[in-house]
Image (tube, helix red, strand yellow):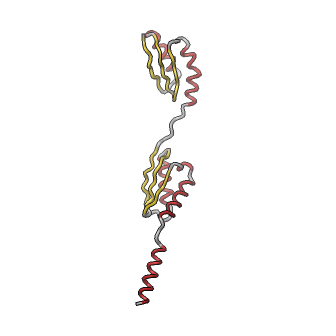
Amino acid sequence: MTAITLILALGMSVASCKKVNDAEVQKAAQEVLMADPALAGVAVTVQEQVATLTGIVEDDAAKAAAESAVAAVVNVKSVVNNIEVVPPAPDYSELDAAINAALADAMKDHATVTATVENGVINLTGEIRERDLPTLMQKLNALNPVQIVNNLTVK
């Protein structure tokens, strides 16, 4: 009877040594993610050896890379990938600068019109005569903006 108890006790201790600690798996997965700057916006949690990824990346390739990297971590059974792909906003600074540089010349004959530029969009306010509107719009379209928002009062 003592031998059976000893065998059961040894069996239980061996089994408990093999129990996977989710916190250790999570730490290993986080280290893998931190090694890739493209995955800086990704977080991982591990519960019962299932890794859940959350956060934001710039493209589908980064999302797939995060999943592959975490799936390769020892003792990760599966990965739930809840990462959102949000592409970076376009940089319109060069376009805005080019439009602003040419805007004064385009607006010189239209003193009652005000134009502002943001993110490639020209926003028009003020008043303009109906016959002058096509000329102004032609000059502004030649600047190749993303859009022209016409809030002018036509007289």
Q: Is residue 121 above or below residue 127?
A: below
Q: Is residue 100 above or below residue 154?
A: below
* Quarter the C terminus occupies: top left
Q: Residue at x 46, y 12 (%)?
A: 128
Q: Residue at x 47, y 23 (%)?
A: 148
Q: Residue at x 47, y 42 (%)?
A: 86
Residue 25, position in %: x, y? 50, 63
Residue 74, position in %: x, y? 50, 64
Q: Is residue 47 above or below residue 133?
A: below
Instruction: Farthest residue to the left: give it.
Output: 1
Residue 93, position in %: x, y? 56, 30
Q: Residue at x 50, y 51 (%)?
A: 42
Residue closest to the eye, 135 or 75: 75
* Quarter the N terminus occupies: bottom left
Residue 52, position in %: x, y? 44, 56
Q: Report how many numbered discs are placed on residues in the image.
A: 0
Q: Quadrant of residue 154?
A: top left
Left or right for 101, reference 3: right
